[in-house]
Image (cartoon, grey):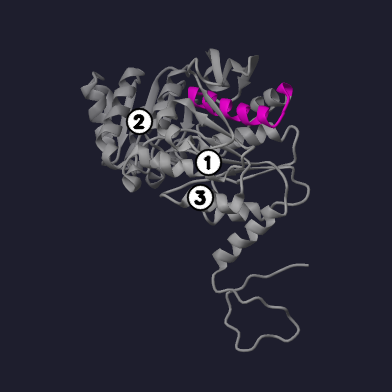
Amino acid sequence: MGAVISDVNLVKAPEDKNLIICRNPLKLLQDLAKLVRQNTNIPVVAITGSTGKTTTKDLIFSILSQTYNCLKTEGNYNNELGLPLTLCKLNREHEAAVLEMGMRGLGQISFLCEIAQPTLGVITNIGQVHAELLGSQEKIAQAKAELLEYLPPQGTVVLNIDAQSLLKPWLKNFQGQVLWFGLREEADIRAKNIQYLGEEGSKFTVIINEEEEEITVNIPGEHNILNALAGIGIARTLGVGWEHIKRGLRQAQLTGMRLEILENDIGVKILNDTYNANPTSMAASLKTLAHFSGTRKIAVLGDMYELGIYEEEGHKLMGQIACREKVDLLVAVGNLGKLIGQGAIEAGLDPQKVVFAANNEDTARILKGYLNKGDVVLVKGSRGMQMEEIVNELMR
C-alpha cells in the first residue's frame, strides 16, 4: 500500500488508478491525524507554555522512553501543520506520545487539542511573549488554559506554581488532577538542596507525594530544574519508576539552539540559545551564564519581539539582570537591543562594559576582536534576529 500527494491538474483521470480529489490538503491532513489518534489508546502528553515547551518535551520524552515506545514532536513542529504531521507517524508499536503545542492567539490550543485528544497536560509558564497579539498576560493564560477543556475527567495537568494566580480562574470546571510544580514550599512537586554544576547541569532533591529522591539533570539552569519537575510530575502520574526517571534526566538530549554548549578552536565556550527569546527565557539564560566558570562572561542579547505593552519594560529589565549577574561585557544587538544596554547602564553597569551593535555581522566582528581562551559567551535573541549567524561566525 502507498500514496502519492501531487499538485497536478489532470484533464482526464487514469482509469486504472484510485484518486482522491482534495480541495484543502491541510484540512485533510488534520482530519487524517485526528483519525489516527482516535484509533490509538495510549497516554498523550500535551505541552504548552510561553517558554520551555521544547525542552520540557525533550525531557519527558527521554524519561518515558526508558519504559515506553514513545513518539514525540520533532523540533518545534507545534502548529496546525506540524502537530498533525507528528500524529500521522503514530503506529501500533507506540505506547505513548509527547506533543508540543504552540499558539499565537485564542482558539489555537483548542484546535490542536481537538486533533490530539491529550490525556495529560503541562503548562510550563505564562510569560509576556505574544502580548503584542493578545494584549496581556491574562489573555495569554486564557489561551494556554484552553488545554484544560480537552483533558478527560481522569486526566492530569501539571502547572507552574508561579503562574497560579493567572491559571486558577480557568481551573474552576476542571475535574482532573492538578499538580503544581516549582521551587515554592506549597508546590506539589518541588526542588530543594539545589547544586548548580555549570555546564554539567544541576543536582537537587525532588519532593512529590511525600517522596524524596536525589536527581541529576544533565542540562544547566534553574529553568531546566523547573522543566525537569514538570517531567517528573508526568512520569510519576504514569507510574514510571524512579530509576527510569533519573536515567532519563541524566541522558536527555535537547533540540538544537536551546542553550547548546559549544567550544571553538581558541577555547571560547559559546552558549547557543538563539532559537527564540522573551523576558522569561532571557532572564533564565543570564542566570545560567552566571553559574558557568570562565575567565570572562559575555552576554550577547538581541531584540525580543511580540512583547506589546511590555516591550520597553521587558528589554530594560534584561539589562538590569545582566548588571546584577555581573557580566564582563554586554553586547546589545538591534534596535530594541539598545533598550537592554540602556537598562544595564541605568542599573549601574560600567558603560565601558556595554557595546551597541547594529546587526549580527557587526556583533561577530566586535566579538572576534575581544574574545580570548576561557571566555564564556551567551548568545540570545528572538527567532527573527537569526543570531545563530553570530554563533556560526565565532565557530569558524
Image location (x, y in percent) of residue 370 = 35, 27
The amino acid type found where label 3 is placed reads Ser
Label ID, residue 138: none
The amino acid type found where label 1 is placed reads Leu
SS category of the residue bearing label 2: loop
Q: Nearer the viewer, residue 292 or 209?
A: 209
Q: Quarter of the image containing the N terminus?
A: bottom right
Q: Earlier in the sequence, mark 1 or mark 2?
A: 1
User: What residue sits right under mark 2 in the picture?
Assistant: 369
SS category of the residue bearing label 1: helix
Label ID, residue 148: 1
- Label 3: few (<14), some (14–19) or many (≥20) C-alpha neighbours in 10 Å: many
Q: Is residue 182 left or right of residue 329?
A: right
The amino acid type found where label 2 is placed reads Gly
Q: Earlier in the sequence, mark 3 or mark 2?
A: 3
Say if the magenta span includes residue 90.
no
Image location (x, y in percent) of residue 17 = 73, 80
The relative height of residue 238 versus residue 95 in the rendered view (above or below) is above
Say which residue appears at 49% left-offset and 35% top-offset. 171
Tell how many labels: 3
Check the image and name the residue furthest to the top: 193
Q: Is residue 149 left or right of residue 166?
A: right
Image location (x, y in percent) of residue 105 = 41, 50
User: What residue sits right under mark 3 in the picture?
Assistant: 110
Q: Which residues are magenta?
A: 221-243
Q: Is residue 239 left or right of residue 325?
A: right
For discs 3 and 2, the disc positioned in front in the rendered view: 3
Question: What distance separates the C-alpha of mark 1 from that of mark 3?
Answer: 9 Å
Question: What distance separates the C-alpha of mark 1 from that of mark 2?
Answer: 51 Å
SS category of the residue bearing label 3: helix
Q: Earlier in the sequence, mark 1 or mark 3?
A: 3
